[in-house]
Image (tube, helix red, strand yellow):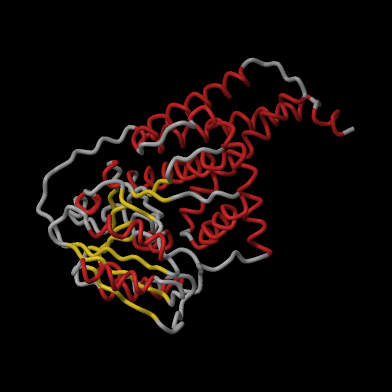
Amino acid sequence: MCFDLITDNSTINLILFIFYGTVVVQLFYYWGFFTRLAFYKFKNQVRKPQAVSVVICAKNEYHNLKDNLPIILEQEYPDFEVIVVNDVSDDETYYLLKVLSDKYPHLKIVNFVDNVNFFSGKKFPLTIGIKSAKNDIILLTDADCKPHSMKWIEQMQEQFHSGSEIVLGYGKYKEEPGFLNKIIRFDTLQIAIQYLSMALAGNAYMGVGRNLAYRKNLFYRQNGFINHYKVKSGDDDLFVNAAASDKNTKIMISPDAHTISTAKNTFPTWITQKRRHLTSGKYYKFTTKCWLGVFTLSQLIFFTAFFTLIAINYTLLIVPALFLLRLISQLIINKKAMIKLNEKNFLLLVPIFEIFFVVLNPIIVLINTVSKPDKWK
């Protein structure tokens, strides 16, 4: 009965119409927006160095700080400080910081010995770290991140000119063996293609705290994180979503400006992290939610319509032709973006990973509506 209904001519025509429509929408996103990053050309210009304050929040991050903090402290840059906010750690974090501060006088420690976190997540310690900074340019990263080069600070501050107040960087994950690592790096790339492309289109809506810079003055004008202090996540994307404009935001994607983290190595821990990241989306501006929602929904409908037509043995050649057109467009854009962002070794898996996330993301959103993900640390 159901199959007869689907194979009815009028139903087939409706499915075809929907399929054609989603192809148009998808191609519009790929060629109208995502090409902005894929074909972006950055001209490196020598400008006068500006003073920078690097701010890092740490909670029980002894091992990560031991590995990563010296690389940040030894950056090849003439005028910077590093502020580490030790948020009630019960490991050896504070003692490590004290030892490092003796060697590096530009390291400043903000030490919390009592839990006075009035906000959700790391917004409160981050706020204190930013307020402790002596410079206007604030460069954020995480304790588990390390710069890709000794020119990270130099590269990120270079985009603070001509009225720019926010610079969006790329925080990549280290390439390691295993299928999960490829999935995580693919997901990171797709998110970057979207937020960096939209920033280039004058509609910046998010950044990642692993590699993000903005002016302290802007932070004060926005009243910090006060508008979303109850949200556990969002210290990076929600702030950018509220503070960014078509004129005050730039991107920096030079490989020397990347940061590198180690990806989660088990599926459950990655899903927990993914759940936290997706909680802030519902607080985005309405226009941002529409832009992301239309793309995501058109993906889901595109695959649903295509596989439905395949299941009923619909043989009109335009269907696989349009599917192939979209696939080629997707691979071209992803290949170009992978070159720009120094990613590799999963291009041919992109179509498979896309279907995986088309199914997974709605499931995570649904789970988040019935149970809250774990808090930061």
Q: Is residue 69 visible?
A: yes
Q: In the rendered view, does 236 fall on the left or right side of 312? A: left
Q: Is residue 220 visible?
A: no
Position of 40 relative to 269 (above/below): above
Give residue 176's position: percent from left, percent from top.
47, 40
Quadrant hosting residue 157: bottom left
Give residue 247's position: percent from left, percent from top.
26, 53
Q: Nearer the viewer, residue 349 or 74?
A: 74
Determine the residue positioned at 37% across, 50% down.
203
Determine the residue positioned at 34% across, 44% down.
201
Determine the residue positioned at 34% across, 53% down.
146
Q: In the rendered view, does 85 fall on the left or right side of 354? A: left
Quadrant hosting residue 109: bottom left
Give residue 277's position: percent from left, percent from top.
51, 57
Position of 95 relative to 189 (above/below): below
Position of 175 relative to 345 (above/below): below
Q: Nearer the viewer, residue 193 or 73?
A: 73
Q: In the rendered view, does 180 fall on the left or right side of 128? A: right
Q: Quadrant of the N terminus?
A: top right
